[in-house]
Amino acid sequence: MSHPTTTLGQDTTPDQAISLDARGIRFEGGPQLVLCASLFYFRLPREQWRARLAQVRASGYTCLDVYLPWNFHETAPGRWSFEGRRDVAAFLDLAQEEGLYVIARPGPYICSEWDGGALPAWLGLDPRLRVRQHEPRFLDRVSAWFDQALPLLAERQYPANGPVIMVQLENELDFFDCEDRTGYLTALRDQAVRHGITVPLIACSGQGDLEGATGDVPGVVPACNFYPDDDSPHIEPEVRRYAELLAERDLPLLITETNRRHRTLRRLLASGASLIAPYLQSSGWNFGYTPSAGNWGRPGNLMSHGYDFGGYVSSTGTERPEYAEARLLARVIDTLGPRLALATPTVPHTPVTTDFPTSSSPSALRLDGGGLLLAVPHLGTGARAEAETGTAVVNGVPVAVAADSCPLMLLDVPLGPWGHEGTLTLASADLVAAGEGVLVFSSEVPVTVVLGDTRVEIPAPAAGAPGRATAEGLTLVALAPAEAVRLRATDRDGTVHLDQPTPARPAAEPVALRRARRRTDTTAPERAAGRHELPPTLESLGVYRGRGTYRTTTDLTGVDELLLVGAADIVDLSVAGRARPTIAGFGATRRIDVREATGSVDVEAVVEIWGHANFDDARLPALRLGALRGLGTVWTVRGTTDVSALWSVHGHWAGRPAPLRELGGWSSTRVGLPVTYTREIRSDTAAALHLKGVIEPVRVTVTDGEPHTAVVRTVHAEDPWVPLRAGTHRVSVTLPHHPSGGGLRAELLALDPVTDWTCSAQDDDLLTRFATEAAPGHEVLLPLALAPGEEAWLDVDLPPSHDGLLLRPGGTQIRVTGWAGGECVGRVWVGDRPDFSGGDADVLWIPPGWSGLTLLVRGATGPNAPELRVLRLESADS
């Protein structure tokens, strides 16, 4: 089948499917202003896809953005799955049936707080493969993924066979240190074209670097992601700048990600956006072992089972107040139609003054056919401000503006398209419907309307009591927002007809479960993974999601501490039978006190992958994109030497011979300029140089060997260690002069590796098989006390539920993994734990119809003894 050509920067002609130019997006026979919601098939049960899609369409949004996670479909090297919840083709077909368009985002990298940003974990096993680079090994693997994914999209492109109106290549590449952006994006573009993608290809910038996101590759349209402070007064001028930059290329402003609050979305619309795609409007769940590790924290944290950032639909499908705001905005867009879709951004021709905090430079749109749409945000914060209505003066006319709102006011708009002669000189509220003889507005406060020279005040509406007025032969109606979203029709005399509100279903009361069946077999089977001189990565053992166990025996005679380097993600370490505090440090080097252990002792570590890094954070080893998981390396510390003295100084006015000072001890008036300290360091064994007191990042250069080789690394406060091989090294430390700092100290730890490890593996498939098999057991009453590192497998009887159940384990120092319906549901960590991001980190969701519930409860080490005290069940719609 032949595909119509997508044209960029040209007017639409009848034979073109989609075209983009400086005035917007054209398809369906005319210009379109597109509201787009994120909705991800891989974060929802398949049984709920249609209902969630219909819910998005009912909100007034007309489009979805949909990631396709590579590692969700390639579950192991060369093993592909597109069945069940992975049947993306079926999801796209349902979207079309529900009347939604789709922006497909197949990556290869997606971020999305998803395990590894969707890059398969095993890519890191090839040291020559470089992810997100114009590098043949990586591109070869991408080709295998695109060979699977892109034909599914090509077959479902608009308008021939499906809903796909755009395809995004990569994701926020401007955040990543890609060496050849043009070459990389060209390679991705060429693959898309080869697979028959004819709709626009886009690439989004995460921090406004259009070239960094697209490589300025012909045929790849720049898009923008904005995540401003919702209360910032400076959103509009920033967004208008990008609208202007893109207009110079004869392209529209496509905002592919932004905040979820509709007060902000209105400001973006008025600043020139043709596509507005708030992320994440419709929430979901990170099932099983799919969450990422290392989102945003100090540094890094763990992503929760719930995937929810407060969008208009919760993870369980509950509609929040922003859902009604979505319907209101969609009504404004529908009412203004092509006039708004073809509008161009500007600033008001006369100043807007307010008695409330507002934009530093309000935005307006020149409507096609005449007139302006003006956004006037009320940015008051705090309880008092939120309760107060403000006054804005627009074109010399004072008008009321509700707190925490952003009315889209109309100025000098011809009324001809609605069958009425004359001009709407000013309307201070959202126009949500217009027809012959009637205009309908939505507002919480009185509405000011100026028709020609006639000024009318419509009283503030109340529930069941619309405000009404007449002027210049028109009936003017004001509805409260809660009723405006239910507007079905309006008669010429101003009589309104509303849809009936959806009755709320009473939520069930929470239930505390104190009984469970504890399985007799308390240990899940392991797959033997061989003996290894040093601890291997879990991925090298075939564990891409799941966990593994490392065991050895070592002599700790005369050893006071161990050094653990590169352990990730969650490490339960036991030395000589004593459990150590659970480690979740993203590969940061850790010192382990073992003074109470002596002689030959057993060492065991259970290492669980929470998820691979979805963002590239250089501060810690496990936060680098593509970093592998496992125990890392364990060293015995054979001696510690202070090496803070005898560093030669280079920089500022330090002369020759180079002065000798303590590390960081050079005095200079040139604050902030770099000073380099150098000294020779010798160790007869492998060693680790520890820089104590690092505040700002410092550069460390290690030169050794013949011929001399230099290794440069940046040392951060989060992991101030430099590994050294045995031998003599010339070490240089360069840091900005900081006389107010606390100074640096340096110590050298002489190390011997702990060797001869026996490994076993438990990937997620193995654990799921064990969890979902029938097994004998006996009833236990909660609370259930566990020792650190002890595990219990519990089968729990659940009552039926229409919307699913939320399970909230209560207790101290336990990690709980749940399985239901033959699938791992997710994980929670109760008690002292790392930071979490996302939704509610304390609950597991059991979808309706997912039979059975099995829990793996593991005791962690912390300030309190591990104990599962109660299992609280809540209705998912509560």
Image (cartoon, helix red, strand yellow):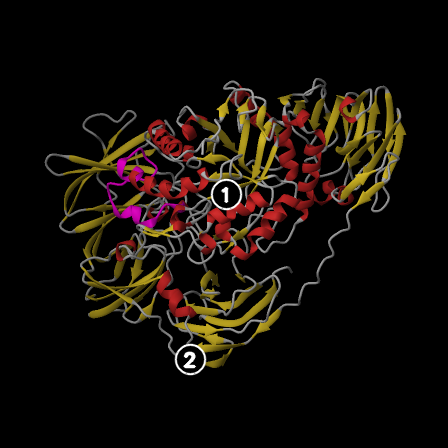
What residue range appears in magenta? 118-139
**Does 593 lie within the magenta span?**
no
- Judge by depth and name the residue closer to the eye, 724 or 112: 112
Q: Look at the image and tell me whether residue 509 can be seen.
A: yes
Q: What residue type is disc 2 on?
A: Pro
**Which residue is farthest left?**
706
The tag on residue 863 is: none
Location of mark 1 (residue): 66
226 versus 611 height, above or below: above
Q: Position of residue 227 (x, y in %)?
A: 54, 37
Residue at 18% x, 28% y: name it.
657
User: What is the C-alpha distance between the residues marked 2 and 1?
Assistant: 42 Å
Location of mark 2 (residue): 776
Q: Position of residue 238 (x, y in %)?
A: 56, 27
Residue at 79% x, 42% y: name it.
480
Residue at 84% x, 20% y: name it.
452
- Judge by depth and name the residue closer to the eye, 43 or 717: 43
Which SS class for mark 1? Answer: strand
Task: Answer few, some or many: residues within 10 Å of disc 1's Cα (few below 14, many 20 plus, some between 14 and 19).
Answer: many
Q: What residue type is disc 1 on?
A: Val
Q: How many marks?
A: 2
Which SS class for mark 2? Answer: loop
User: Which is nearer the N-term, disc 2 or disc 1?
Assistant: 1
Q: Look at the image and tell me whether residue 694 can be seen.
A: no
Task: Answer few, some or many: residues within 10 Å of disc 2's Cα (few below 14, many 20 plus, some between 14 and 19).
Answer: few
In the image, is 581 to the left or to the right of 816? left
In the image, is 90 to the left or to the right of 586? right
Q: Position of residue 499 (x, y in %)?
A: 77, 47
Q: Give the quadrant of the C terminus.
A: bottom right
